[in-house]
Amino acid sequence: MREWIVTNGLGSYSSLTHKNTNTRKYHGLLVASLNPPTKRWVFVSNVYDKIQINNQSYDLNNYNPKFSFDYFPNFLYDVEGVKIKKTIFMPYEKNTTIIMYKINTKKPVTLVHSPIVNSRHIYDVNSQRYLTFLQNKSDDIIFITPDNTNKTIKLKLKDCFFKSAHFWETLYYNKDHQRNDSWIDNNIHIGDFYKLIDKSNRYFLVLSIEDNIEKHPLKMFFKEKQRKKKLINQTGLSKKFEKLVLSSDNFIVKKGEGKSIIAGYHWFADWGRDTLIALPGLCLVTKRYDEAKKILKSFGNYCKNGLIPNAFMENDTVAVYNTVDASLWFIDRVYQYFKYTIDRKFVEEIWNVLTSIIKGYKNGTDFGIGMNNDFLINHDEGLTWMDVKIGDYYPTPRNRKAVEIQALWYNALMIMSTFSKILGKKDDFLDLANSVKNNFNVQYKAQYDVIDTKDLSFRPNQIFLVSLDFSMINKNLAKKIVNDVEDKLLTVFGLRTLSPEDPCYKGSLFGNYNKDEAYHNGTIWPWLMGPFIKAFVKINGHQKNKRIYAFRNFIKPMLDVFGDCWDGSIYEIFDGDPVFEPRGCISQAWSVAEILRAWVEDIENIKPSN
């Protein structure tokens, strides 16, 4: 069943299915970030709606609403000729969800709204009924205070009658059950709001943990709508990009005085690799340059021993550094930012971080990362983007000299050489880049996934030899790589992570094995469509007919599946085999970003104007 999500720029969100049901422990109408963008807690799981017409009660949960999406998710009900439009939004940077009900009726009706509350982290469930909720009422506001947090849930509905209650309801989350995760959760009914409607009307139910609850929800609705319109307009892009632009906004979040990017909803925090890969699509093609700079500054401030953090953990926000590619992506993303802004001052400001990365990789740093005598980068297992781990076992270890790390290393050195010339600094990078190129080409005698182990597993990582701005391979090899990847890995939703011809291939995330074994052994990743399209267009000289072909064959089929009701979200992963079941996070930053970026930069050929 399809799902929707709205966010607030803090990492908080509101998300359910298109039927407004909870099928995951991560679902909720008010899931608030207590330490933006992390420490997210479920406070309001759902609000069950009923309508009373002529002494007959109709439970809206038994109806299939017509889902639509403009700037917000909308749910349309038609019950005995009474039309109900339910719209859900979150005011920007407020831990508040507002539900707008628009009723079109020719007869008196009563709407009954029954909030279901909770108080837990998104990773947890209340398996026991141990929580205590204190309840008070003042004017139009119901105050609910759980005993396990210092936050108070506030529920506001003007001009209504509230009948207090207190009983438990157990929710069963089938999506989590399928993932072998905790899935039985106890929630509290706190009572019912009765709203009498004698003519067509519009009203608002406000759910919040803010100290000051919204007094003018209609004003907040138009303010948030206007903010979204402004984001769309500033891109200068045509209407066909609107859904992806709106979706891209979900991931850009406040972090301290700066900005970061949530890797995916519902359960990821801000991850270094994901943030940097997603940055051009989320911030550059959308012309959010100031936020791009803040993100780069923020991650640059955390650079340690030449390493950019892999992730900030959800529960404690501690930075972890176990990645070999994030630092090299960082250099590339500073370059992409520069191409859009020609911000020489920023490059000067970040120069010491950039050079510390090169120094760390050249001389050796943590996790076995360092340059060998052949000028290529060596590294320990589990440090590339295919980094899944089961206990002490790595299903895709890829240690020593993974192919895309060499591509990123050469690309980074060439960027540093370019920056040296622009800033009038001594170029200590070009000769080293040439040595990397020469030694790589001597050793790359076949399409290896890992160079020195001569691993011929056919994976998508070789595409970065072509797609990055500075490529160290010849045109014939570039064309062969793109053609082979298209033939063996391309699907409607992205690239498979392993050829179906490989005996290790797993066509479904779930089977008689740990799902993490399939994560990078056949599972489709939509974000890889971005570098594939860039490589395809590149080897064909950016010809218009080839760009049209790329849209019709690589972008449009995916959009056609999503349909008109789509909110711009793109899943984290899909099964490798038909029917390509969506899996993982319901909306992933780099999935949205790379599809948007490739469509704008590579297919529409809209390049930086500077």
Image (spheres, rainbow, N blue to C red):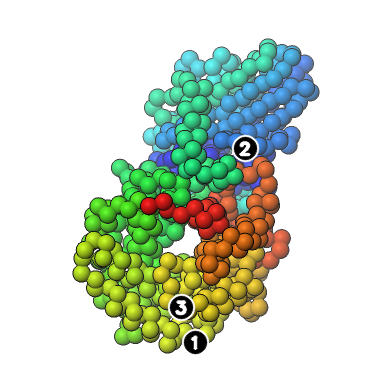
Q: Are marks 2 and 1 in contact (CB under 8 Å)?
A: no
Residue identified by numbered label 1: 445
Q: In the visual, does 438 lie left or right of 579?
A: left
Labelled disc at residue 297: none
249 versus 580 height, above or below: above
- Gap in angstroms between the C-alphas marked 2 and 3: 45 Å
Q: Which mark is residue 69?
A: 2
Q: Earlier in the sequence, mark 2 or mark 3?
A: 2
Which picture quadrant has residue 243? top right
**Contact, mark 2 vs mark 3 (Cβ under 8 Å):** no
Q: Earlier in the sequence, mark 2 or mark 1?
A: 2
Residue type at the position of mark 3? Ile
Q: Residue at x 60, y 36 (%)?
A: 70
Foreground label between 2 and 1: 1
Q: Give the residue number, with chain letter if any, for mark 3.
A: 473
| Residue 250 placement, left or right of 341 | right
